[in-house]
Image (spheres, rainbow, N blue to C red):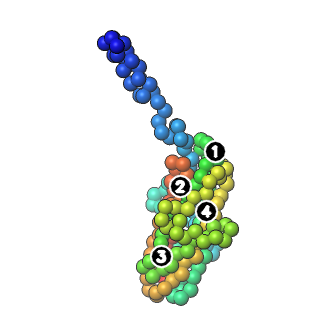
Amino acid sequence: MKRSTLIFTTTALLLVALAAAPAQARWGVGDVNTWVAANGRTAGKYVVGAYPVPTLSVHIADGSSAGVSWVVKNLGGEPSVHSIGFHGCSTGEGFGFRYFAPDGQEVTWKVTHNGYGVADVPRGTRVMLKIVVSAHRSGVSRTCTLKGTGLNGVDYVHLTVAS
């Protein structure tokens, strides 16, 4: 191969590589909103990427448990139908955390390890998990960071539990 042909081919390949779309354009971008609710109070709804992170506080008597609703909503993006994920806290520091899908199936292991994912969620659709938090000691508190994910979108909310 001639030197001029080699230079032309190398230059052409370099220009194609530089002009390629960024990863998010190739794979999509999908924003989410995540929030928690309990006892008629809500934290994080309609607030995406807030700092400080919205926090809901729940008091649980020692030996008792409380239910908390955790919602992740697909705000759309490109493509508008994409998967969403839930990433939460594991049991510890005097509190037990258990997570349940809408069909009642316990998904605690998935939520606390690699995240619990829901595929093919259309824009504007909400998916809810129920969190059952139980208090194992009195006089302790813990703040749990809950993360909702979309394609490249992430949103956080804090759940503070005290006994």
For numbered disc 4, what is the local secondary structure?
strand
For numbered disc 1, what is the local secondary structure?
loop
Residue 160 seen in this snapshot: yes
Per the rendering, the mark at residue 91 is 3
Dots 4, 1 in contact, CB < 8 A: no
Point out the image quarter for the N terminus.
Answer: top left
Mark 1 or mark 2: whose residue is earlier in sequence: 1
* Residue type highlighted by circle 2: Thr
Vertical order, 41 against 153 (above or below): below
For numbered disc 3, what is the local secondary structure?
loop
Rounded to the nearest whole Å, what is the CA distance between mark 2 and mark 4? 11 Å
* Residue type highlighted by circle 1: Ser
Callout 1 crowding tier (Cα within 10 Å): few <14, some 14–19, many ≥20:
some
The residue under label 4 is: 71
Callout 3 crowding tier (Cα within 10 Å): few <14, some 14–19, many ≥20:
few
Dots 1, 2 in contact, CB < 8 A: no
The quarter of the picture where residue 108 lies is: bottom right
Rounded to the nearest whole Å, what is the CA distance between mark 4 and mark 3? 20 Å
Rounded to the nearest whole Å, what is the CA distance between mark 1 and mark 3? 34 Å
* Front tag of 2 and 4: 2
Depth check, front residue: 57 or 1: 1
The residue under label 2 is: 149
- In screen coordinates, is 108 left or right of 6? right
- Please tell me which residue is depicted at 42% across the width and 28% down the height of the picture: 17
* Front tag of 4 and 1: 1
- Please tell me which residue is depicted at 55% across the width and 42% down the height of the picture: 28
- Where does the image place residue 73, in percent across and percent down from the top left? 62, 56
